[in-house]
Amino acid sequence: MFSGSLVAIVTPFKNGNVDETAFADLIEYQISSGTHGIVPCGTTGESATLSTEEHERVVALTVEIVNKRVTVIAGTGSNSTDEAITLTKHAKSAGADGALLITPYYNKPMQAGLIQHYSSIAKTSDIPLVLYNIPGRTGVNMTPDTVAQLSNIPSIVAIKEGSGSLQQVSAIIEQCGENITVLAGDDPLTLPMMAIGAKGVITVTANVAPTDMASMVNLAIQGNYEEARRIHYKLVPLFSALFYETNPIPVKAALASMGKIQHELRLPLTPISFENQDRLFNVLKACGLN
């Protein structure tokens, strides 16, 4: 159901508030550059520091601006199952095409808890669901066995897999077959994951290089891995630079340098250090982005 280069879009702020004008411009930039879908209110969108009202407004605004031109998958995850259900129901009512649900963070639930968490959301929310596994940020790894069990639930249609393990990706695809679509959750592994069966990526890098990310994914889908590899290696320095510090610190600094947003984050995230900013800007310049 979901495939392609789907941008995990930042949430721009201005004077402490969501900058809706800049956000609308970012969405238009993505669509005109070939991005296949917009994913608001994920980790890159600083969902952890958005109020419920802000979260719902950003999702509704995304749906309104996109106006069905590309896919919208709203981030609705939480470490509270009840809150995730509330946010997912709102995404459905706002008109989103799907919901992205990170594994509960800090709680470190057992695999049985993950199954009950996602099953409960699926029972109460009539919208396609995308699991999101990123143990480096949540403290818990969703195993292939758990994904396989959850893939039997009709509304669970995809997983954003960010464990960094191609072996785990292989196991998910082997165990789930056509029951679930795998999307890369780690930009440098997009092409390797697609080579073994993933269908695309939910990407940070597309915030600043949407055309290249979309082109690389399109070429991989077409089976043109020679050209896809060329773009992959072009982007390798950028993949690293955007994670010099905690995401989304570098990508927001990059977008600010490109004149697309204010350089503003919410605490506890802080602006990029001067040392890493210089390194980042050098990479952007080499890539023709600054």
Image: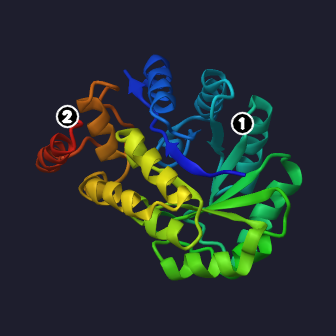
Q: Is residue 249 above or below residue 290?
A: below
Q: x and y percent of residue 191 in the render? A: 44, 64
Q: Which mark is residue 290?
A: 2
The image quarter in which residue 56 lies? top right
Q: Earlier in the sequence, mark 1 or mark 2?
A: 1
| Residue name at image x 72 percent, y 52 percent | 1
Type of the residue with mark 2: Asn
- Using residue 14 as the reference point, say whether residue 55 is left or right of it: right
Q: Which residue is mark 1?
A: 96
Q: Is residue 179 above or below residue 165?
A: above
Q: Which mark is residue 213?
A: none
**Which residue occupies the extreme right position in the image?**
123
**Which residue occupies the extreme top position in the image?**
21
| Residue 135 in view, yes or no | no
| Residue name at image x 80 percent, y 46 percent | 127
The image quarter in which residue 10 lies? top left
- Residue closer to the observer: 113 or 21: 21
- Using residue 70 as the reference point, say whether residue 26 is left or right of it: left
